Amino acid sequence: MNQTAAIALLASTLYGALQAADPLEAVFERAARSLSAGEYAAAEQGFLEVLKASPRNVGALGNLGVVYSRTNRTGKAIDVYSRALEISPNDTLLKLNLGIAYLKQDDHARALPLFAAVVAAEPRHQQARKLLATCRLYTGDVPAAIRELEILRSEQPHDSGVLYLLGVGYLKNKQPDEARAALDEMFTTAVSPAQTQFLLGKTYYDAAQFAEAEQFFRKAMELDPQLPNVQLELAKVYLSERRTDDASAQLRGILERNPADAGANYFLGGALVQDGKYREGVPYLERARRSMPDSWAVSFYLGKAMFHLKRPAEAVPLLREAAERNPREASIYYQLAKALQSLGREQEAESALVKVRELRAQALDREVESSRSVAGIR
C-alpha cells in the first residue's frame, strides 16, 4: 500500500518544478534515482541538500517523505509530508501519502479526512476509497464503511482486501451470514488451507472476537507450523484477553528463533511492563526501539518502565517523544505528568494534566457523536 503511493510519487520526479540552478536540479535527479534504486541514505542526503538551498521544494519534501516512510521513520515522514502540504495544500498525492503514514501509526482518525479529501477530488480513486472505508471501519462508522466496500466489491469482485474488510465490517455490525459470504469469496484466492485459517483468524481478531480468532490461529499453526506471523497474531489475541503468560510463551518462542524480531520484542516488552515487570521488560523494548525508532508505543512503554524503576529523568524525554509522535493519546500525558511531578517540575506536570483532561473530553465527545450517528440522531 505504501509502496504504491511511493511509486506514484516517483513517477513525477520533477514534481513542482525546481526553481533553482541546474546543479541543484542535478542533485535532485540523482537523489530520485537513488530512491528508485533503494539507496535510501544517498537519497536522503540528496533531498536534504536540495531543501537546504530550496526549503519550499515540494518535490524534495515529498520524496524525502517516501525515504522516511520506507525506512520506518514514520514520524519524520508525517512531518515532511505536512510541510509539503502547507506549500501545496491541494496536492492529492501528498494527502494520500500522509494518510498512509498515519495508518502506519494506527491513527485512523487523522488519516480519514485526508483520504476523504482525495476521494472528493478524485471520486474514482479506488485506493483512496478503500483506505477511507478502512478508516471509517476502525473509527466506528461501520455502516458507511460497508456501503463503500460493497460498491468497491461490485467494481473489483476478486479484490481480497475489499472482501477481508467487508468480513470485518459485517462481523462488527453483527451480520455473521454476510461476513461468511464475503470471507468464503475471499478464500478462493488463498493459496493453502493454513492461510485460509490465518485470514479467518485475522478477520475475527480485527472484529474483536478473540475466542474465534484463537481457534483459527491455532488451526493455522497445526496445518503449517512455519506459517509467517501466525504465532505473533496468536500472542496478540492472548494480550487482548489479558492472558499475559500465554502471550509471553508465544513471544518467547518467536524470539528463540529470531532474537531481533521487532514485533515480538515490542509486544513482550510492553506486556512485561504492563504486568509490572519493568526491569525484565526494558531489554526487549530497547531491542524493539533499534528496529522501530519511530514507534510512539515503544517510547511510551520504555518511559513508563524508567519511571517505575525510579529513573524519571530518563523517563521524561522518552514520554515527550511518545507524545510528539502520538499527541492524541491521553495515557502518555498522564504518565509524563507523573514523571515530571517526581522531578518537582510542577508547572510542566500541570500542563500535561491539562492535556489529559482535554483529550479525555474530546474522546467522550467523539463517543457521544458516534453513538448518535449509529442511532440515526442528527
Image (tube, rainbow, N blue to C red):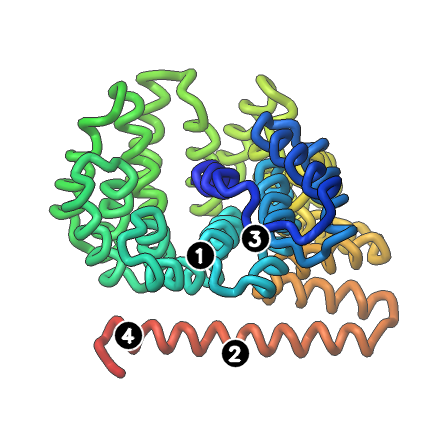
Residue 162 seen: yes
Comparing labels 3 and 1, the label whose residue is closer to the camera? 3
Q: Identify the mark at residue 92; answer none if there is no mark.
A: 1
Q: Kindly state the secondary structure of the residue where label 2 is placed.
A: helix
Give me the C-alpha separation between circle 2 and circle 3.
41 Å
Image-based side of 194 in relation to 10, left or right:
left
Judged from the image, the secondary structure of the residue bearing numbered disc 1 is helix
Mark 1 or mark 4: whose residue is earlier in sequence: 1
User: Looking at the image, which is closer to me, 229 or 249?
Assistant: 229
Tell me which corner region of the image, top left, top right, bottom left or bottom right, holds residue 64: top right
Observer able to see residue 275: no
Q: Amino acid at mark 3?
A: Gly
Q: Residue furthest bottom?
A: 378
* Alpha carbon separation for disc pair 4 and 2: 18 Å
The span from disc 4 to disc 3 (Cα, nearest Å) is 41 Å
Q: Quadrant of the C terminus?
A: bottom left
Name the amino acid type tagged 1.
Thr
Query: Which residue is drawn at the image coordinates 83% and 52% (left, top)?
Result: 314
Q: Which mark is residue 373?
A: 4
Element at label 4: helix
Residue 16 bears which disc, if any? 3
